[in-house]
Image (spheres, rainbow, N blue to C red):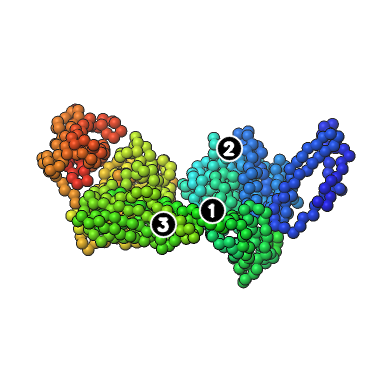
Amino acid sequence: MIKDEINIESIPGIENLGNNYYSNSDDPFIIEIKDTYPQNVPAKLIVSGNGFSDTFKIEIPISPMILFVDDHLGGGDGIDVPIKSYYDSTFRNLGVSYHYWLNSTSPDSETIKKYPIVVWGCEWAFPSLEKTDRDVLSYYLEQGGNLFISGQDIGWDLCDPSSENNQHYYSSGDSKTWYEKYLSSRYISDAGGINPLTPTDSSILDLSSLGSFEFLQPGRIENQYPSIIEPLDNAFAILKYDNNKTAAIASNRPYKVVYFAFGGFEAIKKQPVRMQVMQDIINHFNNLNVRKTILGNTESKGPFTVNCIIKSDQQITDVSLLYRINDSDWNVRNMTKLNDSTYSADIPEITQDSATIEYRTLIFQEDGTYNADIPHRFYSGPDTGPPSITPIAPLPEYTINKNGPFYIGLMLEDDIGIDTNNVKLYLTYFTEGQKIEKTVSLKYSNQSIWESTFYIDHTLQEGDSISYFVEVYDNSSNSNKSRFPETGYLTTKISNNVIIDNFEDNDLIGWYNPRGIWTIYSNPKFVQEGSNCLKTGKELFSYPANINAPIEYAHPFNLTGRENAKLRFLVESILEDDNDTCYVEISSDNETWRAIDKIYGKGLKKWELHEIDLSDYCSEDTDPIKLRFRFKTDDNEASVPGIFIDMVEILTDIVDIDTEQLKISKELYISDVYPNPTNSSICIDISGCRDKTLYINVYNLLGQNVFRKRLLLKTNNYKFTWDFKDSNSRRIPTGIYFIEVRTNNYRKLDKVLLLK
């Protein structure tokens, strides 16, 4: 501080309102700032005199590149919700300096034109952009400025003709003309946007690395109005809602604008996503693309080399590496130019036993603009933490495969890295009284997934089982080990009939769901078996338009040597039109898929049982098969639920028993249904059933399932009674019904007549 104090003789008080201020422009503070990196330096302004003293917090921006206009005043419900903290923390983390403008009055053209980028946050405040705001933004954009603007209901305020209390009304429609010209957008509606947001493959601003993410305007739980818009002229949609409607646009011509209509920037729920979004927008405006080395956790003490590759349409004037140890002050190192686009610098060797190291790059262009860069952190020091194991597709609890193929997939993560030679699956099984042990190595696939598809050397039989566990070591000097499960063993059991999934575990482990379209739906009053089923789309009364979304079961089925085989499942569909279809497909090479069934047809089709014969795949010369469901929709928006699927099963070596045969095996006895006919209820006597699981299904003449029950019996004798009420406890109509009683080995079917 060269001059840190000034004297003020007097300031007019309330007797001279409108003139009660003082300017020290003729006697300024003088601050010398050494050559340093962009930042907002905190400072204090102390005003004192005549026994009075007050302290004000201020900030001094160094190399400010952004004017942030905070336009949150005038909340739509009369409450102002502050938004500065969302922007301030983001700019600081990205290494970007900014000037702050609280928009109680509009910035003037001389002020705004100084900044290469203007970030304007409208929150949910009105007016969103009054005429003076629009005028200064028109001037700024026409001078070649870059504008990132966001807020809830900007479109409604400027474009909706149905209100007599918005800017459209007060400007006689001029605000809509301005909106379409300068924001390159057409306003469609002030609500209707559905979570999550998904980046599009835009050629202007590519946010695809983000994946889908959630939004919610903070402080406005009762007032969520995510607008739907459409890009105009040279603009492109960069974010879309789950219903495929546009939520945000970017335009390069005639004006360089990014506009968020789903809400303010602060509506992005997760901070890491906000940082990535702001980084990409700032670098897009500056036509600057930077990729730096991402260092992983290590036991090395360094030095650590960081390279960065720069793409720019300007001359690069300075490239620096900023780093700090254990959140200390930043250190700056010049990066050496290796070639036309690559620069390099070293983080020095650390002197501590361990440290957390953070670093980012700073690249200046000839016009004074620079990059935004999310700092990267890594750990240097001894590693004592074991790898984490997340099951993606463990061996199924039951399988029809007698000797394979068996598939296992695990997500493995570690601070240092996984020892590629030490990811092992250990198997134990018995055959002909002999204990067999086998070890299988899992190999890296992608995105931290390790997997293996393997066979065993023996053919197992119904009731045999395989016990297994997995051990994983990391690359640290300690060779830290993890085990799955942590103790004991998991088991997969050979069975002729297998429930592939009844979706009662509230997850989709064992399924590959790349689009994330398929979800678990829970409603015990609606679902036919248990409480959960599989559904298309996250929203109950809609499913996405224009999608082609498969969900693939990870585990293959080997039907070779089986007498017969059948796939069956329950399905209910409520579709928008005849073009929307769910295909049931199988593949023997995981590339070419063949449809074996399809679910389609406009309107409601209530729960029914689908059965597909797979006996053609039981011959000795057939390969194992994979199963998937694939939902394909047209461009029409759907306001109905879609497809529900439940109780997916595969049955093999099926033996149909005549309805007059009472004794199914020496151990198990299932009586005929009695009384038959009846006008009230029926009974079935079952014996020899201790520790057995029985499935009881009732079908009408259309093949629709009207009642399902699964029983795990702990007694040897059991009497089943049913009062002809469906799974929702509603009395069913009179008529003929088929009652199926099934175990893993046998199936008995009876016909019964219900009278009035």
- For residue 414, side relative to residue 131 (left or right): left
Question: Looking at the picture, how far across and down is residue 58, in whole percent?
Answer: 74, 45
Q: Earlier in the sequence, mark 2 or mark 1?
A: 2
- For residue 508, side relative to residue 430 (left or right): right
Residue tagged by mark 3?
472
- As measured in the structure, the alpha-carbon distance from the residue carrying label 3 to the one carrying label 2 is 45 Å
Residue tagged by mark 1?
238
- For residue 209, side relative to residue 321 (left or right): left
For residue 671, say whether it is visible.
yes
Q: Locate residue 329: give its quadrant.
A: bottom right
- For residue 749, side relative to residue 447 (left or right): left
Secondary structure beneath dot 2 equals loop
Question: Looking at the picture, how far across and down is residue 577, in whole percent?
Answer: 37, 46
Residue tagged by mark 2?
219
Residue located 59% across and 50% down the image = 259
- As measured in the structure, the alpha-carbon distance from the residue carrying label 3 to the one carrying label 1 is 41 Å
For residue 232, say whether it is visible.
no
